[in-house]
């Protein structure tokens, strides 16, 4: 059983809350895994050229090309992204848009697989986690667990955080607040986020080892997708 972990943060791994939580989930799974960072990768969004329709292989030549076999071969995914403007950051969105290549003519490379959605934000990670969950559903992947944490907004380290009137420290602590080390959110010091990550990883590992029936998961996800589709039309 191999899990593909994706860290959608563009910050260095030691600065990234997403990286910490995705890695914690993967380690707790007890499964073989690979953790790929999207930092520095050039991945454009889907351009709707339909070049993938015949064979479910995207024709665009960028850094997603090398990731395609890893996506297709993995049994499960742990995908994490930062909250940018209350949604996914653009590279994670582009990465997931490009999964369009797997969909055509009942291409079922991803159907019935399992996933964990991870989101981190300066205030909350719920928005990106919900977006990842939505992308999973479009591919009939079941979200086994969702993990969120509070990360350090860049305002804590930009150099102007003590005085800037539109920065996160000002919004949270008001005028005159001086930034201290203890004030800076760090997921590695958030017991709830770490516990949820470990439980998510353990559950993903258990599901993969014990009762993972891809056909059954596919049926359930198709039914869920159809119900949502009917609700929204
Ligand atoms: C362009 C940009 C937009 C952001 N927008 C939001 C936001 O709307 N809500 C929020 O909670 N955090 C926001 N943040 C803060 C990041 O989500 C936060 O720094 C998070 O820790 C980044 O994840 P990372 O630590 O894995 O890099 C934003 C950061 C950037 C750079």
Image (cartoon, rainbow, N blue to C red):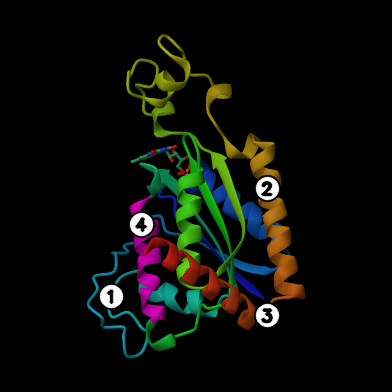
Question: Does any atom of ligand 1 lie closer than 8 Å to the CB of label 1?
Answer: no
Above or below — where is 156 with respect to 30? above
- Between the residue at mark 4 and the residue at mark 1, the CA separation in whole angstroms equals 15 Å
Residue pointed to by mark 1: 61
Of badges 1 and 3, nearer the viewer stands 3
Badge number at residue 148: none
Q: Which residues are magenta?
A: 89-103
First-in-chain label (4 vs 2): 4
Quadrant observed for ligand 1 in the rendered image: top left
Q: Which is nearer the N-term, disc 4 or disc 1?
A: 1
Residue 7 in view (yes/no): no
Which numbered disc covers residue 213? 3
C-beta proximity under 8 Å, tags 4 and 2: no
- Rounded to the nearest angstrom, the CA distance separating label 1 from label 3 is 34 Å
Secondary structure state at the residue bearing disc 1: loop
For the view shown, which residue lies furthest in the bottom direction? 54
Give the residue at x 32% y 64%: 43
Closer to the chain start, of discs 1 and 2, is: 1
Q: Residue at x 75, y 67 (%)?
A: 206
Q: Secondary structure at mark 4?
A: helix
SS state under label 2: helix
């Amino acid at each position: 059983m191999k899990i593909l972990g994706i860290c959608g943060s563009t910050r260095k791994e030691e600065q990234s809350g997403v990286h910490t939580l995705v890695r914690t989930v993967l380690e707790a799974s007890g499964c073989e895994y690979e953790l790929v960072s999207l930092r520095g990768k050039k991945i454009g969004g889907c351009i709707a050229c339909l070049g993938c329709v015949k064979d479910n292989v995207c024709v665009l030549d960028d850094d997603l090309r090398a990731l395609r076999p890893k996506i297709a071969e993995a049994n499960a995914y742990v995908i994490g992204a930062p909250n940018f403007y209350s949604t996914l950051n653009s590279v994670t969105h582009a990465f997931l848009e490009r999964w369009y290549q797997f969909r055509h003519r009942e291409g079922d490379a991803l159907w019935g697989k399992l996933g964990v959605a991870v989101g981190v934000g300066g205030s909350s990670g719920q928005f990106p986690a919900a977006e990842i969950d939505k992308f999973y559903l479009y591919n009939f992947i079941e979200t086994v667990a969702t993990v969120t944490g509070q990360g350090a907004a860049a305002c804590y380290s930009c150099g102007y955080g003590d005085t800037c009137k539109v920065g996160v420290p000002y919004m949270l602590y008001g005028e005159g607040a001086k930034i201290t080390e203890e004030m800076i959110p760090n997921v590695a010091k958030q017991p709830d986020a770490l516990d949820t990550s470990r439980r998510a990883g353990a559950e993903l590992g258990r599901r993969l080892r014990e009762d993972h029936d891809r056909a059954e998961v596919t049926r359930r996800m198709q039914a869920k997708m159809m119900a949502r589709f009917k609700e929204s039309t």
